[in-house]
Image (cartoon, rainbow, N blue to C red):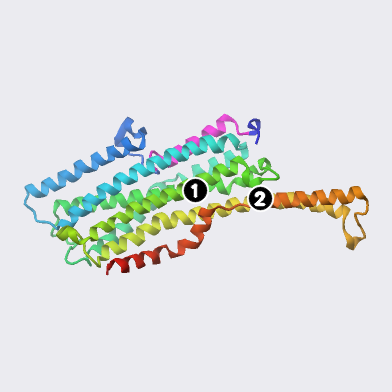
Amino acid sequence: MNRSRSAPAADRDRLLAALDRLLGRAMGSNLPLFGRWADAAPLPFASLGFAAYAVAAGAALFLAERLAMPGDPRFASLIVWGLFWYTSVLFLTRAATLRAVDTVRRDILPHAPAAFVAAVADDLEQRRSPLMQWWVPMLAALVAWVASGYALTFDSDIGAFDFDRVEPERAFWSLMALYLCFVAARGVLVGRFYEPFARRLAEAKNGFYVLGAADTPLVKGVASLGQQMVLFWAMIFLAILSIMVLAFAPLGDYGFGEGSKFLMFVVPTAGFASLGYGSLVYLRSEAAIRTALQRFAAAQIEVLQARCNALLNPAAGRLAGDPGEAEAVDRMQEWHDKILAGARYGNRLATVLSFTLPFVMPLLSVVRALLGWG
């Protein structure tokens, strides 16, 4: 696409501003307490979260020691794992946010027409509503928090809802678990931000390459954005899966042991909310890209077929007997095939996900059985 046909600077700035407000500093986590450090690179950004969590956790554990309040050591293990998970998520979300904005700025906007940019900006602005930013994530967080707390009650006599025993470790983990559930829920909802780019591709169809629509820079930029996000969710899932170390026997009283109902609830549930849901959003976006390209190709071919019918329509008694007409028909047939081939869209990642996603959760059950959990 010609740069002269790209969107005006004001429209591009509007889209970037809407994207920035939606994504925040780390996929929905604005972390206002970080002040000017909120714009740091992924490692310093995550380090600040690590320090804040570690200080708060240390205070809770110190208070428990000073008050000589005996507590379940498994809460201490959860607090330590939470520190790892929170730090990992901050690093991954900050890196994903920076990469996504950079992809939009470098690989999408320079090739995007005004109609496409305006449509995507409208969608992004609508997604930043109080309902989706606060109320839905909080409701989801409360449901996940209560369900995980209930699952804890099945692990021996841990008594997650025994409010007669509110040790500092238990209280800290309860508050932190609620916060982590909220961050996760908000991240899942915000992580769908790239859908409008795929769904609005039809607004840019006049800029597609006629003989290679799938190779149009704008299409490739939008596809790259989706691939980045599904790989991001895969990394988040691996961070969640790390909680299984708490089932290892060497941890003794600090571990949950084999057959932990809590662990077997957390991994599939959080796994679906991250990689599972993220993959479904990705596949839906891929389908939108494919549909836009197919419709573009169909519109081009319709014109070619009309021209062919004017020259060659045996039922109507029209035959391309003239050498020039026959050559024109052959040439249009060649264009027909090239247009169709150039609009074919698909990548290996989408194909793999479409076949393997239904087996992700059952696969976890197989891993569980092989390792002897439950």
Q: Does residue 207 sit above or below 167 in this rendering?
A: above
Which residue range is magenta in the image?
6-26
Left or right, residue 164 beside residue 196: left
> For residue 110: magenta?
no
Magenta: predominant secondary structure element?
A: helix
Mark 2 belongs to which amino acid?
A: Ala
Left or right, residue 346 beside residue 130: right
Q: Is residue 6 visible?
A: yes
- Please tell me which residue is depicted at 85% across the width and 48% down the height of the picture: 328
Q: Which residue is mark 2?
A: 343
Question: Do the numbered discs 2 and 1 sit on residues whose CB atoms are within 8 Å?
Answer: no
Q: Give the quadrant of residue 112.
A: top right
- Please tell me which residue is depicted at 70% across the width and 52% down the height of the picture: 340
Q: Residues within 10 Å of mark 2 (few under 14, many from 20)?
A: many
Image mark for residue 120 = none
Nearer-N-terminus badge (2/1): 1
Which image quarter holds the C terminus? bottom left
> For residue 15: magenta?
yes
Q: Give the quadrant of residue 42.
A: top left
Look at the numbered disc 1 and give the secondary structure of its residue: helix
Residue 258 position within the rendered picture, expressed as x and y whole percent measured from the top left? 23, 66
Residue 57 position within the rendered picture, expressed as x and y whole percent measured from the top left? 19, 46
- Please tell me which residue is depicted at 66% across the width and 50% down the height of the picture: 343
Residue 354 position within the rendered picture, expressed as x and y whole percent measured from the top left? 51, 60
Q: Give the quadrant of residue 108.
A: top right
Residue 271 position within the rendered picture, expressed as x and y whole percent measured from the top left? 37, 58
Q: Which residue is mark 1?
A: 227
- Please tell me which residue is depicted at 36% across the width and 56% down the height of the picture: 140
Q: CA distance from mark 2 to mark 1?
A: 19 Å
Which image quarter holds the N terminus? top right
